[in-house]
Amino acid sequence: MSPFPYRLVATDLDGTLLRADESVSARTRDALAAATEAGAAHIVVTGRAVPWTRHILDDLGYEGIAVCGQGAQVYHAGEHRLLTSLTLDRQLAGLALSKIEAEVGPLALAASRDGLEGEVLMGPGYRAHAGPLPYVPYEDPAELWAAPLTKLYLQHPTLSDDELTRAARATVGSLVDVVMAGPGVVEILPLGLSKATGLSLAARRLGVKAAETIAFGDMPNDIPMFGWAAHGVAMSNAHDELRAVADEVTASNEEDGIAVVLERLLSV
């Protein structure tokens, strides 16, 4: 049997590692454990901020480094502390928001506050996803800007996620980054920030290089991570933009797509 060919396995969460009920199958857990036993580190790289990620990591028994908040936060799960955290310039974000609304009309907004206990604020009209993730509703727009933020979330009453992302990026792409991270999840981030940014920082701490990394994902916000890693694997349920740049496409998150690839590599 040949050695496992990668030293780092990077996995997105939603639509990739997690099934629709936010669980991780026994098969996928076993495959990740086998890759770890073969010498690879597993690192979670997610758009979720730490407060929306911690319970999943704890359930997995995950004690290593995780990349959260689209790369803004590098989190040590075993020590429950932030190693790095990058915030959004609120004045610049406010300017970008006003320019986008001038182009497409009023938006429903939410925001993720910085920190281990950072709240997610949701404004009037913002459509929250069903599930257990906590959020705090707000009415006064001033509340949105009252504390440091890692990101803003945008929703439009009629534009699709792809349409809103394209329009926002065309309008303010020189001021901030705009990414589509999931259904109903269009985000404003600090310019230059991506999952690749956070993953490269985390990999450096682990002494691992991009050439030694395999990455799994499902949405356009995973494109920079695929560009950084040696091998990018899109789930069959992935967005077309990610599938177009992937090195291979595996089964869906509901069909243990990560395990399918890892088992193949482990058996070579």
Image (cartoon, rainbow, N blue to C red):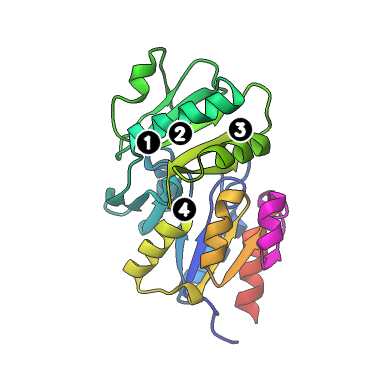
Cα separation, mark 1 vs mark 4, equals 18 Å
Q: Position of residue 119 (x, y in %)?
A: 36, 29
1 and 4 marks in contact (CB < 8 Å): no
Q: Where the C terminus falls, by quadrant?
A: bottom right
2 and 1 marks in contact (CB < 8 Å): yes
Cα separation, mark 3 vs mark 1, equals 23 Å
First in sequence: mark 4 or mark 2? 2
Q: Which amino acid lies under the numbered mark 4 shown in the image of this protein?
A: Ser
3 and 2 marks in contact (CB < 8 Å): no
At mark 2, the secondary structure is helix
Cα separation, mark 3 vs mark 2, equals 19 Å
- In the picture of the structure, the residue carrying the numbered disc 2 is 96
Cα separation, mark 3 vs mark 4, equals 19 Å
Q: Which stretch did the figure color magenta?
A: 235-254
Is 244 inside the magenta-drawn segment? yes
| Residue drawn where x is 51% and y is 44% of the image | 173
Q: Is residue 127 left or right of residue 77?
A: right
Residue 184: give its label: 3
| Marker count (numbered) | 4
Q: Position of residue 153 (x, y in %)?
A: 49, 32
Mark nearer the viewer, 1 or 4: 1
